[in-house]
Image: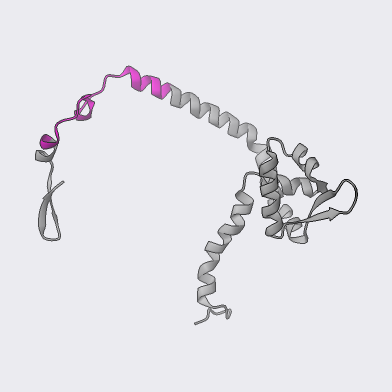
Amino acid sequence: MSTADGEPRRARAQEPCRTREVLDIVGDKWSLLVVRQLSRGPRRFIELKRAVDGISQRMLTVTLRGLERDGILTRTVHNVMPPHVSYALTPMGTTLREATAPLLEWSLLNLPHIDAARAAYDTRAEQDGKARQAQPPTGPSASPHPAPREARQATATPTTVQGRQSSR
């Protein structure tokens, strides 16, 4: 069975699930930062390591391999002494950079606002926590010693489950 544009329904139904694969690249902690660095031209491993603040050597290696596997970048080994390896964006990697540039710009523009919102939230949460500690507990759950199991079962409301009566 096909849709109006001739594409099988089964293929269309799988598209949202397949897009998660792409979103994994975009949502990865390091990938977009590496892609951004490569948008300035080919880079060697050590140049990328220095340019992407906080990335470990292992994470950079894993990230580069994943991006190469996905066709976002190419790895070129130059036959010189010592061996020289460089990484560059593929045409698809360039389109990824173009598509995600607004997101990175938004991030840089809004980081101060996000930091302020986090600080305000943390202050409120800390004040709420102190207020809760200052109030004595009330109600049935206030007792530090829960009621015995038999007492809890005796006060439970009977319910009917598929024609049987049970006590929850």
| Quarter of the image where one finds residue 119 | top right
Q: Position of residue 13 (x, y in %)?
A: 50, 69
**119 horizontally vs 150: left or right:** right
- Vertical side of 113 occupied by 69: above or below: below
Q: Residue at x 49, y 82 (%)?
A: 1
Q: Of all residues shown, which one is farthest toward the right? A: 80
Q: Residue at x 88, y 54 (%)?
A: 79
- Vertical side of 89 occupied by 57: above or below: above
Q: Position of residue 60 (x, y in %)?
A: 70, 44
| Quarter of the image where one finds residue 164 | bottom left
Observer-nearest of 109 and 20: 20
Q: How many marks?
A: 0
Q: Is residue 130 visible?
A: yes
Q: Is residue 129 magenta?
A: yes
**76 horizontally vs 145: left or right:** right
- Vertical side of 130 occupied by 97: above or below: below
Q: Residue at x 60, y 49 (%)?
A: 27
Q: Is residue 163 magenta?
A: no
Q: Residue at x 71, y 50 (%)?
A: 64
Q: Position of residue 71 (x, y in %)?
A: 71, 60
| Magenta-drawn segment | 127-151
Observer-nearest of 84 and 5: 84
